[in-house]
């Protein structure tokens, strides 16, 4: 039973001064419901079966491991090296496209995703959000943000047009083809949903959302593991026992790997990546507990209020995989684990992201020991800025092949 007087009354999205009217994430218009539903189904279809997400991620894990090997134990900034892995997974789903780990276009896209995530978490943008009418024409980082958004959308539009020109309706190659076929079906509609603009914004939404959060979580996660070498050591032990050195990690291993499962959950809980969720809006007058929330009210269902609940997670400010383990060392489910939000706006990439986090973490630790450049005790895990997201500190690390240890 819900807490509300009517089903899903808080699934609106306030109009944001920087937000497009189309796509899935920021869309609050008439095209949202259909675009979301269709995107979810399409992601699910491309995710299932033999050519599905598990294989897609396993294939990418080989490229990631190779790029890590090529660092030859030297210090490197993990941001874009690690980021290539989720970027390629979503790029394969959207465009059937794979980038080399030093591809210029890929690096350009990732650096714009990364910069936007950072800018959205700075004080200036918080101010801009509230006073955009006054600030729009002034110089400031909102201009950089808008410029990046426009370049990302142009890139997506180019890919959509390439796909349109080579579309073979009898065999859609990817997510973009599938949306283009919906456009074709609506050719004579007076109010089409799948316009070129909506397809481009939807694809751009999937692209940056599918890259940046997973990339940041992996990067933050590795920093946490360097601070707690005893956690890393337990992970190596579990991986060696369950998977061994020779085969690539699989999703079925999760059942036998409660410790890694708990660590991945605890990383997501602890880093609290998007602490204030995305803003919601009451789509009608709503009764919540003893309050009346009038239609149009912006509602911020904060995620840190559940992720840092001290009843559910004792000492919530500490990184403790035991938050997700029972006395017998088995994985302990928590209904407070709401890193992906909930309800009609719940993250459409949740399944994909969880699979990537588990498989990429397992593959990295199967093959490498992490080496910090500073004493683990001196690693500061505090975010460098908090706003839309909590952004991890910049750092370098070394990865040492385990066969050489
Ligand atoms: C998102 C992400 C990034 C930005 C906004 C929403 N959902 C990733 N998932």
Image (spheres, rainbow, N blue to C red):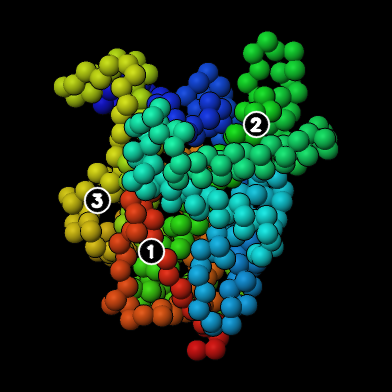
Q: Which residue is mark 2?
A: 199
Give the Cα separation between the discs numbered 2 and 3: 37 Å
- Numbered disc 1: secondary structure: loop
Residue 304 in the figure: left or right of residue 132: left
Where 44 falls versus 358 (above or below)?
A: above
Q: Nearer the viewer, residue 174 or 47?
A: 174
- Left or right: 356, with 378 as reference point: right
First reached walking from the N terminus: tag 2 or tag 3: 2
- Residue furthest to the front in view is 138
Q: Which residue is mark 1?
A: 393
Which is more N-terminal, label 2 or label 1? 2
At numbered mark 2, what does the secondary structure look like: helix, strand or loop?
helix
Q: Is residue 147 above or below residue 6?
A: below
Residue found 57% across the figure and 66% down from its top: 81
Q: CA distance from mark 3 to mark 1?
A: 21 Å
How many badges with numbers are in the image?
A: 3
Figure quadrant of residue 68: bottom right
Q: Which residue is mark 3?
A: 308
Q: Nearer the viewer, mark 2 or mark 3?
A: 2
Nearer to us of marks 1 and 2 is 1
- Across and down, in percent, residue 77 comes to 50, 70
Identify which residue is drawn at 56% across, 22% down.
Answer: 31
Residue 261: x and y in percent read 41, 60
x, y percentage for residue 252?
A: 52, 59
Residue 263 position by quadrant: bottom left
Residue at (75, 17) in percent of width and height? 187
Image: 21 above or below 320: above
How far apart are the alpha carbons under marks 1 and 2?
Answer: 35 Å
Q: Position of residue 304 (x, y in %)?
A: 28, 46
Helix, strand or loop under label 3: loop
Please tell me which residue lies in front, 328 or 15.
15
Say the numbered circle drawn on residue 55.
Answer: none
């Amino acid at each position: 039973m819900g807490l509300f007087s009517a089903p899903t009354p808080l699934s609106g999205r306030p109009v944001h001064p920087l937000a497009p009217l189309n796509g899935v994430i920021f869309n609050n218009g008439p095209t949202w419901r259909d675009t979301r539903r269709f995107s979810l189904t399409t992601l699910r279809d491309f995710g299932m079966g033999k050519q599905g997400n598990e294989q897609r991620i396993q294939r990418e894990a080989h490229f990631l491991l190779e790029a890590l090997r090529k660092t030859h134990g030297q210090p490197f900034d993990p941001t874009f090296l690690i980021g290539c892995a989720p970027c390629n997974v979503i790029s394969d789903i959207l465009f059937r496209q794979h980038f080399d780990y030093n591809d210029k276009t890929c690096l350009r896209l990732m650096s714009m995703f990364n910069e936007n995530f950072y800018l959205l978490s700075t004080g200036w943008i918080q101010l801009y959000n509230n006073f955009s009418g006054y600030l729009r024409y002034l110089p400031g980082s909102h201009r950089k943000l808008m410029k990046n958004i426009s370049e990302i959308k142009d890139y997506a539009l180019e890919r959509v047009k390439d796909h349109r020109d080579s579309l073979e309706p009898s065999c859609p190659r990817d997510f973009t083809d599938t949306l283009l076929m919906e456009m074709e079906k609506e050719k004579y509609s007076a109010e089409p949903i799948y316009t070129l603009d909506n397809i481009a914004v939807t694809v751009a939404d999937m692209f940056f959302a599918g890259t940046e959060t997973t990339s940041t979580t992996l990067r933050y996660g590795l920093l946490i593991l360097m601070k707690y070498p005893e956690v890393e050591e337990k992970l190596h032990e579990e991986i060696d026992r369950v998977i061994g050195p020779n085969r690539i990690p699989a999703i079925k291993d999760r059942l036998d790997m409660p410790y890694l499962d708990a660590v991945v959950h605890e990383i997501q809980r602890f880093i609290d990546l998007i602490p204030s969720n995305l803003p919601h809006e009451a789509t009608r007058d709503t009764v919540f507990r003893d309050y009346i929330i009038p239609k149009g009210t912006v509602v911020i269902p904060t995620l840190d209020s559940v992720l840092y609940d001290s009843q559910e997670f004792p000492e919530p400010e500490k990184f403790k995989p035991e938050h997700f383990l029972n006395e017998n060392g088995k994985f302990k489910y928590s209904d407070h684990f709401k890193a992906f939000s909930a309800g009609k706006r719940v993250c459409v990439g949740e399944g994909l992201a969880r699979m990537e986090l588990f498989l990429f973490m397992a593959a990295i630790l199967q093959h490498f020991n992490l080496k910090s450049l500073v004493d683990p005790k001196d690693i500061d895990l505090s975010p460098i800025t908090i706003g839309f997201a909590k952004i991890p500190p910049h750092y370098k690390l070394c990865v040492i092949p385990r066969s050489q240890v």
